[in-house]
Every structure is written in structure tokens, then in C-alpha cells.
Amino acid sequence: MIPIGPEDRVFILTGAGISAESGLPTFRGMNGIWRTYRVEEVASPVAWARDPKLVWEFYSERRRRHHTVQPNPGHYALARLEEEMGDRFFLCTQNVDRLHEMAGSRRVVHMHGKIFQSRCERGCGRPPFDDDWTLENGAEIPLCACGGKIRPHICWFGETPFEMERIGTALENCTVFMAVGTSGVVEPAASFVRYARARPKNVRTCYIGPEEPSNRAFFDQVFPGPSGEVLPRLFAAEKSATDLHG
Ligand code: OAD
């Protein structure tokens, strides 16, 4: 168990694995999304320039799928921890789904964007907006008032993730770093653990998931297993051993 004391600040990084038990596929591994689609054909600025309808087909399918899923005990465990720790808790997700919010998490930083948001491709000044539009047969892609096409508010390969400044500050300040359900291969998220450890304080790091991540060497501890089982157990044990309220 990683002890959390009243002075601790916890940084949590989640990846596709935390939503796997809810029925959303991960990206890599068996049945992973990138086994069916080529990332450069649906999730890159080049793909958008070449075939925006194919890109929208991909994200429309993911929007439709999201309407059928619910949070799992892993999402709920993190929402409870946020409630107990308040602003000593920072949740950063690489996921574009909204399962953390559906479980009750209030302050979620979506570094790769949100599946139910869109924006103008031209960056014309109109801010990203909530949107559940899907591309149906024969439809045209909606246009912004400026004439640009509306695109998903998702960070594609080759683009800069969102909210990196806030994330950097939280990494500098954390004393406990936990990664959950992420393979540790996609940058910059894969380097967060190394960055957190580079601070001159004694940061404890752990990973939760059924397989060891590629950046395993930077974690002090691994709690093996599905996060929907491990997280509730971990925090129940945590709570009985120490008062998270401080
Ligand atoms: P990956 O698909 O690379 O990794 C998913 C991880 O979840 C793997 O390490 C699995 O072992 C683990 N896993 C599977 N089932 C689990 C469970 N029940 N509980 C916990 N862990 C489980 O997904 P990410 O690391 O999130 O980016 O991928 C990072 C980024 O790459 C994504 O945000 C996406 C992708 O390309 C963009 O689309 C921009």
C-alpha cells in the first residue's frame, strides 16, 4: 500500500484501461482500437486534410458507443478520493470519454480533449463547444460561421495536448504519483512519472493495471489487476490506515 498522509498531494494519470471494464476498448493490445483503424488515417491533421468524413465516421462511432456505457468501480473510487482530498487531489486523464465525470469527479483535466466537444478547424476564436453531432449517411460536415469545418475537440497525433501548464504545476507539487491503465508509450504522458520523480522531494510512484507498462522502471510499486477491482480495494485499505482528511 502507498500511504497517503495529510500533507500529501496526489497526481493521478488515467488511460484507456480504466474505462475497459465499462466496455470501451483500449488502443493497443488485443481488440485495441489501433488494431482496427490506422491512427494516421483517423487521428492526425493529415487524415483530417485528406478525408474529414472518414475522421468524423471514426469519432461518430465513438460518440454513439459512449451513449451505451457507464462508469465502473475504478471511476467511482477516484471520485470518492477527490471528495476526501479536495484540492490535494489532481486527476489528469488521457481519455476523451466522460466516465470520470459521470462517476462524480469534478475537476478532470482532459489532456487529449473530450469526445463530446467540437471546435472550428481554423481556430477562428470560437471556443470549443459541447456537441454530440454524429455523421449519418449523406450528411455534410457542419461549418462554423467563419466557413471552417467543425472538427472533434481531440488532440491528434502531432498536436499539442491541452492544459500542459496546469499539468506541469501539479506534477511539480505532487508527492504521490499514480498511473492507472495506461501503457506508458504515448508522450508526453509517458514521461509524467519521470518528471514527478525528478523533483527534489521524495515522490512515491505506483502503477495500477493488469500488465506492466513500458515505463515500469519509474514506478516504485505496481498493483496488478483490473483497476475496477484494485482501486476500490486500495483506497478502502488506505482509508482504514490513515485519515485522508488530515
Ligand atoms: P493503451 O491502449 O495504450 O493502454 C491501455 C492500458 O490499459 C494497457 O497497458 C492495458 O494493460 C491496460 N488495461 C487493460 N484493461 C485494464 C483494466 N481493466 N484496468 C486497468 N488497466 C487495464 O491506452 P493509453 O495508454 O491510454 O491518444 O493510450 C494513450 C493514448 O494513445 C490515448 O489517449 C490515445 C492513444 O493513441 C489519442 O488518441 C490522442
Image (tube, rainbow, N blue to C red):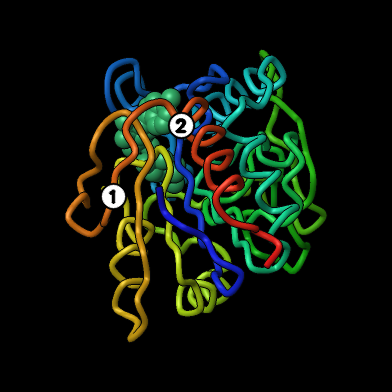
Instruction: Where is residue 147? Give x, y as percent.
Output: 73, 53
Q: Please identify the quadrant where the C terminus is shown.
A: bottom right
Please identify the quarter of the rendering in which residue 202 is found.
bottom left
Please give the residue where the numbered disc 2 appears in the rendered image: 230
- Most foreground residue, 65 or 211: 211
Number of numbered discs visible in the structure rendering: 2
Task: Specify the amino acid type for callout 1.
Answer: Gln
- Secondary structure found at label 1: strand
Q: Is mark 2 within 8 Å of ligand 1?
A: yes
In the rendered structure, the answer to whether residue 13 lies left or right of residue 145 reads left
Task: Specify the amino acid type for callout 2.
Answer: Val
Q: Which mark is residue 119?
A: none
Q: Quadrant of ligand 1?
A: top left
Q: Residue at x 26, y 48 (%)?
A: 185
* Residue closest to the far front: 241
In the rendered structure, the answer to whether residue 41 lies left or right of residue 101 reads left
Compared to residue 57, the image places residue 111 above or below, namely below
Please give the residue where the numbered disc 1 appears in the rendered image: 221
Q: Is mark 1 within 8 Å of ligand 1?
A: no
- Label 1 and label 2: CA atoms lie apart by 13 Å
Instruction: Where is residue 233? Give x, y as percent.
Output: 52, 33
Instruction: Where is residue 151? Give x, y as percent.
Output: 63, 45
- Secondary structure found at label 2: helix
Disc nearer the start of the sequence (1/2): 1
Could you tell me if residue 170 is visible in this image? Answer: yes
Disc 1 + disc 2, Cβ < 8 Å: no
Using a 10 Å C-alpha cutoff, classify the residue at mark 1 as few (fewer than 14 neighbours), some (14 to 19) or many (20 or more): some
Could you tell me if residue 39 is visible in this image? Answer: no
- Most foreground residue, 150 or 102: 102
